[in-house]
Amino acid sequence: MRRRHDMSIDISNPAELHDPTGFGYSHVARVRGDLVFIAGQYDSDADGHTTSDDFATQVQRAFANLGVALRSAGLDYADVFQLRTFIVDHDLGKLEVLGKQIAAIWGDRPPVQTLSGVAALAMPDMLFEVDAVAAAS
């Protein structure tokens, strides 16, 4: 039995990102107008395929796509308070790449983050994925 909640939930998919519905998810969910959940973003082109096999490039592109998803909800990186990151075959070199990207965006006040080292992600060429929770002002 499915319970109906009294909260308002708005699910959307920015036109600038690939259509994820065929993969079984949406990019953005806004709850009660205050909380916004961004699905895992990765180095994806308009068709949802990765564009590079370079880890640093995939991290940079994933965070750029995160920015697109945030802006589609009227938010920006400064509104993010939680990140979850996933790294295939995690090691300290990859952690350094991620740390530099996060510092470039958030400086010395990064959001809380949980990093998971994983054996694989949804598609074979994916090396990195990031999802986020943000709060609208």
Image (spheres, rainbow, N blue to C red):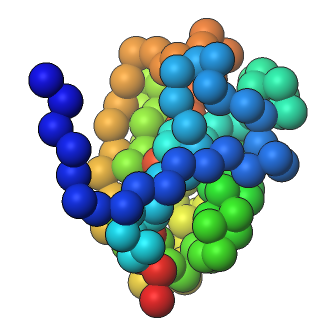
Q: Nearer the viewer, residue 9 or 113?
A: 9
The residue at 47%/34% (across/down) is: 87
The residue at 73%/59% (across/down) is: 68
Q: 9 above or below 20?
A: below
Residue 49 appears in which quarter of the rendering?
A: top right
Query: Where residue 43 appears, x then y in whole percent?
Result: 72, 36
Residue furthest top in the image? 124
Can you see residue 76? yes
Q: Nearer the viewer, residue 99 or 131?
A: 131
Residue furthest bottom in the image? 137
Query: Where residue 135 appears, x then y in whole percent?
Result: 41, 76
Give the side of residue 33 with respect to residue 98, left or right.
left
Query: Where residue 56 appears, x then y in whole percent?
Result: 69, 43
Can you see residue 38? no
The residue at 53%/48% (across/down) is: 11
Q: Nearer the viewer, residue 100 or 65?
A: 65
- The quarter of the rendered structure image containing the N terminus is top left
Give the side of residue 20 with respect to residue 10, left or right.
right
Query: Where residue 122 appears, x then y in whole percent?
Result: 52, 17
